[in-house]
């Protein structure tokens, strides 16, 4: 079934949603340094590599592709971007390349570490760029107390001229940020949003109900549920694949076209599952390589996705394209 057929079946409002998704890249955008809000579909970019380092030409191709698809923003040097395997010069070169190609599209930079003084030093360097925000997880490995986490994030927020987005992902950091701590952080005027990978529906609901932070789904299979609860959007690695359909899903939810959003989510869900069948970003890089966008290269200790999995992804995307042809 084509997108046009699906939208006709769902009604005239659904058609307008999908039409808007197809032309979203042409919408007027706010300055990258001051977005009105952290909402909609954000792609946490992979970092393409070649034998010399970051493949900047391939990176520019990716940014142009996602701009045309109408996504709302980009995240650079997050976990999907393999920032932990990049030195500071490579991170800055990658960031500057994305900013140069992104134009008015908002860009958020990842800021991770466990040495607070060094994190603040790098924050000062990143802050010289026109960023929409900085995405900061809890300090990994050291497992600070709730008081320590509160102090850490407040220090970053005080030092940053750009908005701070919290990144709650305890299975990577080893640090659980309690709901009460997040609600206290929500009172800080420069802490604006959260990428929610906390693994707790109760926490997600409490944050959305509180309203102090914009809540973006960070676990891909939680996208529909988070939006249904009132979340502001998503930062999803799966949105590398058919980003136009993720934009259509988000817009359908905003227009209360839940049946249409549900159909799109179920169509995308098999690909979401396959993309995380092996450690991210190996599978998505393998698929993008098959599509001629980048090389499949990841940095050790990460390993490239197995050929059998990439074959499955290729077949799943072909089926998705058959059901929802690209505009």
Image (cartoon, rainbow, N blue to C red):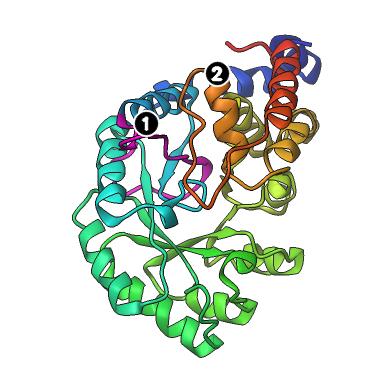
Q: Secondary structure at mark 1?
A: helix
User: Is 110 left, or right, of 117 in this rendering?
Assistant: right
User: Is 44 left, or right, of 102 in this rendering?
Assistant: right
Q: Residue under circle 1? A: 59
Nearest to N terminus: mark 1 or mark 2: 1
**Residue 225 at x, y percent in the picture:** 75, 49
Q: Secondary structure at mark 2?
A: loop
Q: Give the distance between the C-alpha atoms of the residues marked 1 and 2, in whole angstroms.
A: 14 Å
User: Is 106 left, or right, of 8 in this rendering?
Assistant: left
**Residue 230 at x, y percent in the picture:** 66, 52
**Residue 154 at x, y percent in the picture:** 39, 78
Q: Residues within 10 Å of mark 2 (few under 14, many from 20)?
A: few
The verdict on residue 241 being magenta is no
Location of residue 31 by image quarter: top left
Residue at horizontal 38 percent and vertical 61 percent from the top: 111
Q: Residue under circle 2? A: 291
Give the magenta part as a residue range. Answer: 29-56
Residue 60 seen in this snapshot: yes
Residue at horizontal 46 percent and vertical 52 percent from the top: 78
108 or 191, which is in the foreground? 108
202 or 125, which is in the foreground? 125
| Relative vertical location of residue 280 with respect to residue 140 in this rendering, above or below | above
| Relative vertical location of residue 213 with respect to residue 35 in this rendering, above or below | below
């Amino acid at each position: 079934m084509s997108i046009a057929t699906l939208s006709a079946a769902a009604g005239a409002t659904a058609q307008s949603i999908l039409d808007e998704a197809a032309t979203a890249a042409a919408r007027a955008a706010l300055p990258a340094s001051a977005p009105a809000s952290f909402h909609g579909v954000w792609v946490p970019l992979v970092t393409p590599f070649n034998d010399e380092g970051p493949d900047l030409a391939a990176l520019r191709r990716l940014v142009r592709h996602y701009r045309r698809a109408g996504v709302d923003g980009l995240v650079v040097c997050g976990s999907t971007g393999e920032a932990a395997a990049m030195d500071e010069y490579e991170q800055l070169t990658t960031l500057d390349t994305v900013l140069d190609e992104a134009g008015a599209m908002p860009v958020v930079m990842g800021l991770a570490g466990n040495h607070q003084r060094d994190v603040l030093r790098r924050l000062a360097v990143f802050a010289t760029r026109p960023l929409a925000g900085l995405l900061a997880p809890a300090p990994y490995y050291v497992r600070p107390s709730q008081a320590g986490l509160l102090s850490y994030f407040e220090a970053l927020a005080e030092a940053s001229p750009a908005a701070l987005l919290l990144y709650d992902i305890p299975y990577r950091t080893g640090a659980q940020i309690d709901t009460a701590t997040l609600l206290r952080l929500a009172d800080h005027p420069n802490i604006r949003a959260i990428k929610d990978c906390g693994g707790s529906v109760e926490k997600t609901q409490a944050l959305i109900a509180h309203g102090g932070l914009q809540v973006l789904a960070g676990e891909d299979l939680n996208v529909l549920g988070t939006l249904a609860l009132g979340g502001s959007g998503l930062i999803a690695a799966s949105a590398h694949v058919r980003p136009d359909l993720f934009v259509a899903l988000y817009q359908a939810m905003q227009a209360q076209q839940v049946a249409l959003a549900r159909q799109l989510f179920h169509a995308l869900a098999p690909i979401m599952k396959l993309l995380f069948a092996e450690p991210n970003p190996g599978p998505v890089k393998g698929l993008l390589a098959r599509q001629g966008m980048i090389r499949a290269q990841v940095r050790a200790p990460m390993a490239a996705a197995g050929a059998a999995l990439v074959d499955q992804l290729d077949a799943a995307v072909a089926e998705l394209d058959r059901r929802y042809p690209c505009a």
